[in-house]
Amino acid sequence: MPAGASAWDRGLAALRQYQQREGHARVPRKWIETVRDDTGHQHPIRLGIWLSNQKQRRDRLPHERAAALEELGV
């Protein structure tokens, strides 16, 4: 993940990391996933809340973001 990634990109990276490790994208609401950027800095992502927000906004998400989530099984 690039060091200057947006909050959405960090959330997506956290979801990919979680899905790769767990084999699914059913994230508990209180789950926090930590991702590292290219410089090694850690970013704790409140992944359960982030994912819940994306689901609530699914009708308003740009096509490429919705497609990225769908690709991960959301």
Image (cartoon, grey):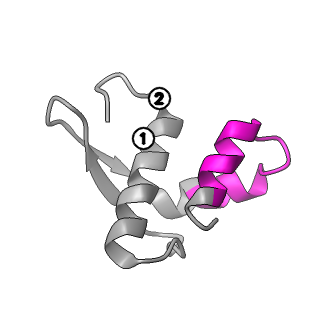
Hey, what amino acid is under mark 2? Ser
Under tag 1, what secondary structure?
Answer: helix
On whether residue 68 falls in the magenta region, the answer is yes
Between 45 and 15, the one lying in front of the other is: 15
| Residue drawn where x is 39% and y is 53% of the image | 14
- Magenta highlight range: 51-70
User: Quick check: marks 2 and 1 in contact, CB under 8 Å?
Assistant: yes
Measured as percent of width and height from the top left, residue 37 is found at 25, 36
Instruction: Report crowding for label 1: few under 14, some 14 to 19, many 20 or more residues within 10 A (C-alpha).
Output: many
Q: Is residue 7 left or right of residue 42?
A: right
Reply above or below: 58 against 27: above
| Residue drawn where x is 48% and y is 76% of the image | 24
Q: Is residue 24 left or right of residue 70?
A: left
Hey, what amino acid is under mark 1? Arg
Real-space Cα separation, disc 2 to disc 1, in angstroms: 6 Å
* Residue that protrudes farthest toward the top in the picture: 4
Answer with the quarter of the image where residue 71 lies: bottom right
Reply above or below: 49 against 5: below
Answer with the quarter of the image where residue 18 lies: bottom left
> Which image quarter is the N terminus in?
top left
* Residue that protrudes farthest toward the left in the picture: 40
The number of callouts visible is: 2
Majority secondary structure of magenta residues: helix
Is residue 32 visible from the viewing direction of this image? no
For label 1, the residue is: 10
Measured as percent of width and height from the top left, residue 55 is found at 72, 58
Instruction: Report crowding for label 2: few under 14, some 14 to 19, many 20 or more residues within 10 A (C-alpha).
Output: few
Q: Which mark is residue 6?
A: 2
